[in-house]
């Protein structure tokens, strides 16, 4: 991606990631690492207080914003929305608790957030399309989450067009439905991409690209292509056991060379 040679820190993408719960620290970290590998200048990572020290160890560049406790609470929403007002794109959902109280807060964040959103994992619910309607939002469900949303794969384009959002259905062949209702299909990769965390990486990479000015549908297509290509590149050396961290480590090179 081109950038002005005289640009300054923060002018080439600021990404926020909001995720994690008492038992899940890896999901938001994976998303944040992928956003960092996309070339975004700054990454803000908001996650449970209990995990803040682990998050800081994964990257010296993360600006960590711990929740007030070990799960997302009502007191966190105001400060998080203030943070979202300063970023170019945000990932919401990886690893967040799915209790009724937390889901209510997630919906409040989606409806109130002023920035483009990548909605993943716990942020994919039966009400997500309505909460994101008309916003600059990308939803990244796998087939099971699509069913939880009450959307059939055959109606993907129609639903995205009616809600004026992007829906990126993950699978062996990714299907990306834009606000125009058209479907883009991306094939490739291998079964090693079933490892936990690759969906979090996809969400973070999309966010990093959107934060740098790539249109959401194009960002989805690029991110899907890169991650599937990473699986292909890594397979000869590691088989299906290359894992999510190695996928992240290939992102910068593949973005530069594809």
Image (tube, rainbow, N blue to C red):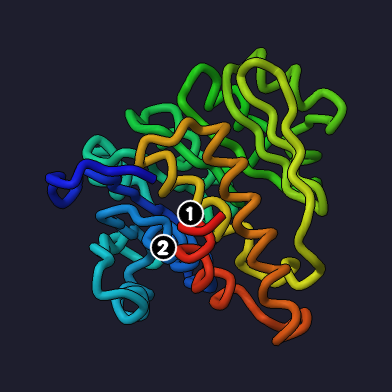
Above or below, 171 against 20 in this view is above
Above or below, 21 against 175 in this view is below
Name which quarter of the figure residue 197 lies in: bottom right
Can residue 97 be seen from the camera position used here? no
Disc with the residue nearer the chain's start (2 vs 1)? 2
Q: Position of residue 61 (x, y in %)?
A: 25, 68
Q: Residues within 10 Å of mark 2 (few under 14, many from 20)?
A: many
Q: Can you say which quadrant of the picture contains the N terminus?
A: top left
Residue found at x 69% / y 59%: 228
Above or below, 62 against 119 in this view is below
Which residue matches tag 2? 37
Q: Position of residue 27 (x, y in %)?
A: 53, 65
Near-viewer residue (108 or 140): 140
Q: Secondary structure at mark 1?
A: helix
Near-viewer residue (31 or 238): 238
The extreme bottom residue here reads: 237
Residue found at x 72% / y 21%: 182
Residue found at x 77% / y 83%: 239
Can residue 243 be seen from the camera position used here? yes
Q: Residues within 10 Å of mark 1 (few under 14, many from 20)?
A: many
Which residue matches tag 1? 204
Locate residue 132 relative to residue 129 in the image: left or right.
left
Q: Position of residue 139 (x, y in %)?
A: 60, 37
Near-viewer residue (169 or 230): 230
Q: Can you say which quadrant of the picture contains the C terminus?
A: bottom right
Locate residue 140 relative to residue 81 in the image: left or right.
right
Above or below, 102 against 198 in this view is above
- Give the Cα separation between the discs numbered 2 and 1: 9 Å
């Amino acid at each position: 991606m081109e950038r002005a040679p005289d640009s300054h820190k923060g002018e080439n993408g600021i990404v926020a990631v909001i995720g994690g719960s008492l038992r899940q620290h890896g999901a938001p970290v994976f998303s944040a690492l992928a956003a960092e590998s996309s070339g975004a200048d700054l990454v803000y990572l908001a996650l449970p207080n209990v995990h803040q020290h682990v998050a800081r160890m994964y990257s010296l560049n993360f600006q960590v914003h711990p929740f007030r406790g070990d799960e997302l609470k009502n007191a966190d929403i105001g400060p998080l929305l203030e943070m979202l007002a300063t970023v170019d794109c945000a990932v919401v959902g990886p690893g967040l608790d799915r209790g009724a109280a937390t889901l209510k807060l997630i919906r409040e964040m989606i409806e109130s957030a002023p920035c483009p959103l990548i909605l993943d994992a716990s942020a994919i619910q039966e009400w997500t399309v309505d909460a994101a309607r008309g916003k600059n939002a990308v939803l990244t469900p796998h087939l099971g989450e699509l069913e939880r949303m009450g959307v059939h794969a055959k109606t993907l384009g129609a639903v995205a067009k009616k809600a004026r959002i992007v829906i990126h259905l993950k699978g062996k062949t990714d299907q990306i439905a834009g606000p125009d209702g058209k479907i883009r299909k991306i094939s490739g990769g291998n079964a090693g991409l079933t490892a936990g965390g690759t969906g979090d990486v996809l969400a973070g990479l999309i966010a990093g690209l959107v934060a740098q000015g790539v249109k959401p549908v194009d960002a989805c297509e690029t991110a899907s292509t890169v991650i599937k290509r990473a699986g292909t590149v890594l397979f000869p050396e590691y088989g299906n056991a290359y894992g999510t961290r190695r996928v992240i480590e290939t992102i910068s090179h593949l973005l530069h060379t594809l």
